[in-house]
Amino acid sequence: MNKGGFSQLWLDYKKRTDNGGSVYVSKVFLSGFLQDHRIVKHALEELKSGVQTMLGVEIKVEQDMSQATLVLKRGSEKEGGVRREGYRLWETGGVLTLAAADERGLLYGVFALLRLIAMERPFQGLDLLSNPESPLRMYDHWDNMDGSIERGYSGRSFFFQDDKVLVNERTRDYARFVSSIGINGVVINNVNVKQAATWLITDRYFQEVRQLSGIFADYGIRLFLSLNFAAPLELGGPQSADPLDPKVRDWWREKMEEVFSKVPDLGGFLVKADSEGRPGPFTYGRTQADGANMLADIVKPYGGLIIWRCFVYNCTQDWRDRQTDRARAGYDSFIGQDGDYHENVILQIKNGPMDFQIREPVSPLLGGLQKTNQMLEVQVAQEYTGQQIDVCYLVPLFKEVLDFHTYCREKCDTVSDIVSGRTFGNVNTGMAAVCNTGDDANWTGNDLAAANFYGFGRLAFCHSLTADEIAEEWVRLSISNEEEVVEKIKKILLGSRGTYEKYTCPLGIGWMVTPETHYGCSVDGYEYSRWGTYHRADHKGLGVDRSRLGTGYAGQYREPNASLYDNMETCPEELLLFFHHVPYTYRLKSGKTLIQHIYDTHFEGVREVEEMIGLWESLKGKVPDPVYDGVRERFDRQLHNAKEWRDQVNAYFYRKSGIEDEQGRKIY
Ligand code: GCV
């Protein structure tokens, strides 16, 4: 805990064991960078304060390179292999060198160096080259201007309060945290842009937005805003938002001229259009491309980007209708305009076709599109994955998505390849995550949820880091370097996604949650609703037939994925119920019937939560008390939640199927 009573998370520069690091970092020489460049200045400040508090060393900036033990210099692809925003850190002959391609790279390199000190790693023989894989690495905040956060589980917003923009002691620390993990873009307001938020692009808020973007720019972060597509109507412009109407275009042109003159560091805009009641081009019979391109052309002279979300589907469906399939909607709405989007438009695609469930197939739009900039959207905020009450470390899920072969090319066809620009050779591409922070003292509600906040950034920067490596870094930096603590917390984190999946909805079917809040079990909560989120359970089986005999969704994939998913025998079992309606008596590869698998996994899930609690309790006194107590208290709630899920799911399917548990355990 630090200034203002809030945590410094993984930048908690407390005293560390000196493994010879102090010798290197005491005499610094800067070459090829201007010391008073805003990012360089902040990188040096960070280096000084980190080294001072962790090693007790006062850094001296040398004027003569031969005196230096740490050389910070400009590198290039040829010299050191560093590319845009990348860095290389190496030791030779008692001198540590940090070469960076640009100022951002220098800042990231400084944070990497501080990480090594914090993890008490030696510098001798070090050679670390790190070029960011995703060009854009963004956090999206769903913060509302009244201070509430849509799907927020860590308190109120630290960006907004009572329709005002906040610039306070948290702002800079937030910027430091996210830049230290390589984030270079942040959207501060909710994609559902309503009321006061529509006015963020007016005089009412320019001053504070500019201040915020200035602080972000100190750390190499571009600020983005979510935009209301119907702003012309709401801000006294033409009474239309038709993207092809010249009056509407003129209004936006003038508006953007004003916005970028007042907030010159602005990166651009995120738009949720024609989705869940938000306005969009469909209202005027125009395509999504018409809407996105209109805005993109207007912001182009300012270097602005339009990030356009693909979360478009019919949310007023009739549950009786078995042909309309929400999973199909994103692909059906966007694939027809592949190639129509202008170069500064990026389509932001949720990892799965539904909505951030604990298990979904990868969206077929990723790699389905071939001529369009694509950005992957994941959710670090744990809306459907335990709401920062239940522990659920999401890096393994994100990695599965990145590793997925789309077969859009013979080589270089994974989602990682696509969002790093390797597949299509583009730079307007990357990864975005819905952030999980709020104004709680520890920023993320559950202290262990900060591993997701940390992990997304590290993974977006370096796709090849393993979930294990990221967890290890996070524990060492944020909690303790003590081996026992590191190993036990890693064990909790690495098993947590599997555990959560076991006690909630089986084999990719998703949902079964309490409507609206999305926490806790309600098997039929969404079964007869308008949201297109059904499990279709009857007395014989459950699951949605998305094969060619059903909704045909499986056919949206490229081969061999399409056939793999289409066939019940070859469909990956963890997704079986997403793609097929399966009899309870169907035998899985394990030899168990589907119903027995449901019973077993639900009993196992609860047992695993109990094991996690046991592990955590063995750490009492070894992790800071507030962290111990906060997590312990949440574990009680997680256990209660897991038992409710187990008993409701098991009772539901026992009553539907009438099939007994082979082990005769208590089912209600
Ligand atoms: C911001 C889901 C969430 C909504 C969210 C929406 C989206 O439906 O429940 O809260 O709205 O996704 O991603 O736009």
Image (tube, rainbow, N blue to C red):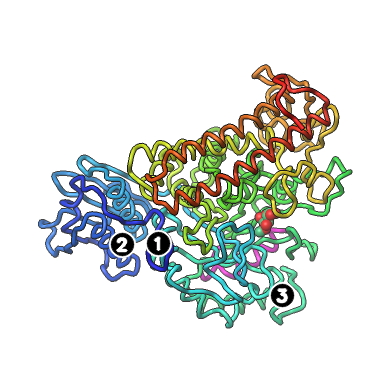
For the point 28% across and 58% down, which residue is it? 50
Within 10 angstroms of label 1, few (less than 14), some, or many (20 or more) residues?
Answer: many
Q: Residue visible at 65% across and 47% down?
A: 384
Amino acid on which the number 1 mark rests in the picture: Arg
Query: Alpha carbon of mark 3 to alpha carbon of mark 1: how far?
Result: 43 Å
Q: Is there CB contact under 8 Å for labels 3 and 1?
A: no
Q: Is residue 56 left or right of residue 171?
A: left
Q: Earlier in the sequence, mark 3 or mark 2?
A: 2
Q: Is residue 466 visible?
A: no
User: Image quadrant of residue 649?
Assistant: top right
The stretch in magenta equals: 287-305
**SS at mark 2?**
helix
* 632 relative to 172 in the view: left or right: right
Amino acid identity at mark 3: Pro
Three-letter amino acid code of the residue under disc 2: Glu
Label 1: state its secondary structure.
helix
Quadrant in the rendering for residue 667: top right
The residue lying toward the viewer, choosing from 148 and 421, is: 148
* Residue 236, percent from left and from top: 71, 82
Using a 10 Å C-alpha cutoff, classify the residue at mark 2 as few (fewer than 14 neighbours), some (14 to 19) or many (20 or more): some
Pointer 3 residue: 246
Whether residue 592 is visible to the viewer of this picture, yes or no, is yes
